[in-house]
Amino acid sequence: MPAADLHEAAIERATETFGALSTPSRLRILLALADGEATVTELVNATGFSQPLVSQHLKTLRGLRLARVRRSGRQAYYALDDDHVLGIINDALDHAHEELSQLPGHDTHG
């Protein structure tokens, strides 16, 4: 694949990644996975979302290679696919905290 085509393909893939991260529930699931592997039940407990919603979002996140699954017997364990995912999330959250701290009436130490 020529470099220009590869660059365009990477831009398209990055927009898909940002689209997946633009949903608060998916972001919360990924943040829960930042602590390590978790089952769907553990993610339901950590997020307060329904099991079908967590499963649906995990399917999307796996499709975009933001999360992966490891099976052991009948149990499935989900994890972040790589450290880049957490880096993107942390950078976005740092930016949001910085922006919010500049608003009148917001604590800048939070």
Image (cartoon, rainbow, N blue to C red):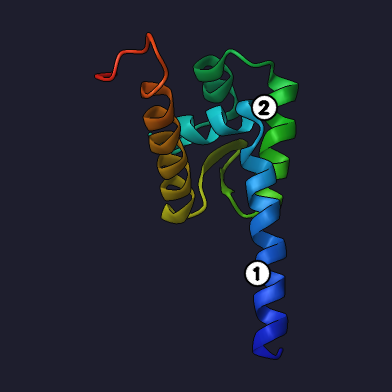
Q: Is 88 placed above or below 55 here?
A: below
Closest to the observer: 27 or 79? 27
**Viewed as shown, does residue 108 lie left or right of 29?**
left
Q: Could you say which quadrant of the image residue 99 lies in?
A: top left
Position of the N terminus, as image quadrant, is: bottom right
Q: Residue at x 53, y 39 (%)?
A: 77
Residue 88 image position (x, y, % from top left): 47, 48
Q: Secondary structure at mark 1?
A: helix
Query: Residue at (41%, 49%) from the top-left corner?
Result: 87
41 versus 67 height, above or below: above
Residue 50 in the image: x percent, y percent?
A: 69, 16
Q: Which residue is mark 2?
A: 54
Residue projecting furthest to the left = 109
Marks 1 and 2: CB-CB under 8 Å?
A: no
Q: Position of residue 71 (x, y in %)?
A: 58, 45
Q: Could you tell me which secondary element the residue under label 2 belongs to?
A: helix
Q: Indicate the quadrant where residue 90 lies.
A: top left
Q: Quadrant of residue 52?
A: top right
**Residue flagged by tag 1: what amino acid is it?**
Ala
Q: Residue furthest bottom?
A: 2
Give the labeled residue for mark 1.
Answer: 10
Q: In this image, 110 relative to 91: left or right?
A: left
**Is residue 15 shown left or right of residue 69?**
right
Nearest the eye: 25 or 55: 25
